[in-house]
Amino acid sequence: MFGRILIANRGEIALRIIRAARELGVQTVCVYSEADADGPWLDLADEKVCIGKGPSADSYLRIDRIISAAEMTDSEAIHPGYGFLSENAHFAEVCRDCEIEFIGPTPEAMGRLGDKISCKRLAKEAGTPVFPGTDGEIEELDEAIEIANEIGFPVIVKASAGGGGRGMRVVHDVAELKAAVTSAQQEAIASFGNGAVYLEKFLDKARHIEVQVLGDKHGNAVHLYNRDCTSQRRHQKLIEEGPAPNVDEAIRDKVCESAAELIRKAKYSGAATVEFLMNQEQEFFMLEVNTRVQVEHPVTEMFTGVDIVRESIRVAAGEPLAWTQDQIKINGHAIECRLNAEDPDMNFMPQPGTIESWRPAGGPGVRLDSHVIEGYRIPPNYDSMIGKLIVHGHDRNDAISRMRSALSEMKIGPIKTTIPLHQRLLEHPSFISADFDINWVERLLDE
Ligand code: ADP
C-alpha cells in the first residue's frame, strides 16, 4: 500500500478520499487554490500545498504544479477525484512518466473507453447493448443518410470526443442532417480538437440507468449493480438511487454483467461507470463510460457495502479486488439528493456566500457527504454542490420516507439550496411510482 497520496481535487470528494485513505493508514496531501485556503477538508489532510489562484485553470487544472506538489511531498500516487483532470489521459501519462501512480486507469484504457467511437466498438465485442447507428466516424454524408433512414428518425449526431453535451445535434429528417453533421463537426473541433462525429438513434422517452464497475490490474472486473439517475435538470443529475426500480432482474443482471465484461476487455483498473438509456420496453443502449469515480458512488456503497473509493486506492497500489462477483449482494435501497447552493426560484442561480447556519441530518441509515461547516464561505469559482444527502432503507418506500425526513432535518441558512425542490420531487407520484423519463423534472418546472 502507498505511504502517502496526493489529492488533486477539492470539496466533498477531497474529503471522501481523505476518509478512505485514513482507513487504509495512508497519509494525504491536499492541493488547494487561494479561493479554497479556508476549506474545512484541508484540516483533515496530513499536508496541504497551495497551487495557485481561484480559477481552476490557474490551480486544479495545472498539471505542472500538481506534479511538483506530489514530488515535493513524496506522494507516491495521485487521486484525481471527479471533474478537473480525472478524465485527462495526458495527465495520467505525465503521472506515469514521473513515476507517480495515477489512481485510475492507464492512459491507454482511458482512451479506449473515453473515445466514444472506440468505446462503442469494444462494447459490441463485449455484448454491451449499444444504440443502432453508424459503426464509426461519419465520413460520407450519403452513408449517414442511408443509416438514418434505416434506423428511422429522430437520430442524434454526436462527437466521439464529446463531453458536457457539446457537439450533439438531434436531427428529425434528412433535410436537417447535412447541416447538423457539419456544425457538430465544427463544434467538436473547437471544443475537443477532434472533429470525429457519429450518428445513432435518438430515444425520446428514456430513463438514465448506469452500472458501477470496478477493475484491478490482474484482469479482474466486477459490477456493483445499477443506479437510476433519471431525475435531471439540463443533463445535471439531481437525485440518484439504486438499485434502479422497475427493471426486470434478468435484464438487469445481463446488462450489468456485460458492463463488467466491457471493462475487462478494456484492461481497465479502478472505478468506472457505464451509462445507458433504457426505453419503455426495457431495452438498454449504452451512452458512454465515465472513467472515474462518480458523484453518486455513495448510492452503490450504501446498498452493496463496498467502499468504492477505498477499492480504487487498493487496486491502484496493485492489490487484487477484495470482492468477487458472488460476494456482491443487493441489500435494500439507497437514494442520494445533491444539495446545491442554488436558488430554484431564480432559475437555479448559484448562491455563493457564507453559510451562517448548518444543521445536518442524522439518524439510522442517513449519510451526509459534505465538506461544509458553519461559517464556511462558498467560493464563486467552482460548482455549487455543497453536499450529498444519502439514505438507505430496507426497500424503496422505506428509503423515500427516510429521505423526506432527513431533508426536513437539514437546516441551511441564509443560502438558498435545492432542498425544497427535492422535497417536491420526492412527493410527486411520478417519482413515487418510478414512472418517469429524463425530461420529467424539466416538464414539472415548466408547469
Ligand atoms: P456527454 O458526454 O456530452 O455528456 P452523453 O453521451 O453522456 O454526452 O449524452 C448526454 C445526454 O444527452 C444524455 O444524458 C441524454 O440525455 C442525451 N442523449 C445522448 N444520446 C442520446 C440518444 N441517443 N437518445 C436520446 N438522448 C440522448
Image: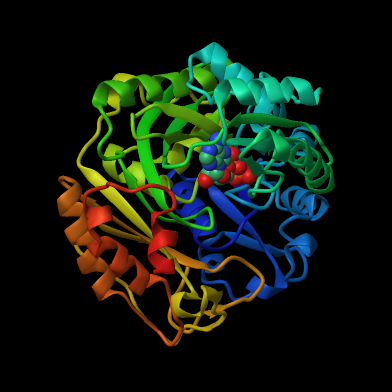
Where is residue 23? Give x, y as percent.
41, 47
Q: Nearer the viewer, residue 332 or 99?
A: 332
Horizontal placement of 396 versus 104: left or right? Answer: left
Q: Is residue 163 above or below residue 8?
A: above
* Residue 331 x %, y %: 21, 38
Res. 53 image quadrant: bottom right
Among the 4 quarters of the image, the one containing residue 32: bottom right
Q: Is residue 253 above or below residue 212?
A: above
Residue 281 showing in the rendered view: yes
Vertical position of residue 151 compared to residue 228: above or below: above
Q: Quadrant of ligand 1?
A: top right
Residue 267 visible, this angle: no
Residue 45 location, quadrant: bottom right
Q: Position of residue 175 (x, y in %)?
A: 72, 37
In percent of the image, x 49 and y 61: which residue is there?
A: 12
Q: Nearer the viewer, residue 397 or 377?
A: 397
| Residue located 45% across and 22% down the image | 260
Q: In x, y percent, where is residue 267? A: 59, 19
Q: In the rendered view of the protein, which quadrant contains the C terminus?
A: bottom left
Q: How many marks?
A: 0
- Judged left or right of residue 359, residue 234 is right
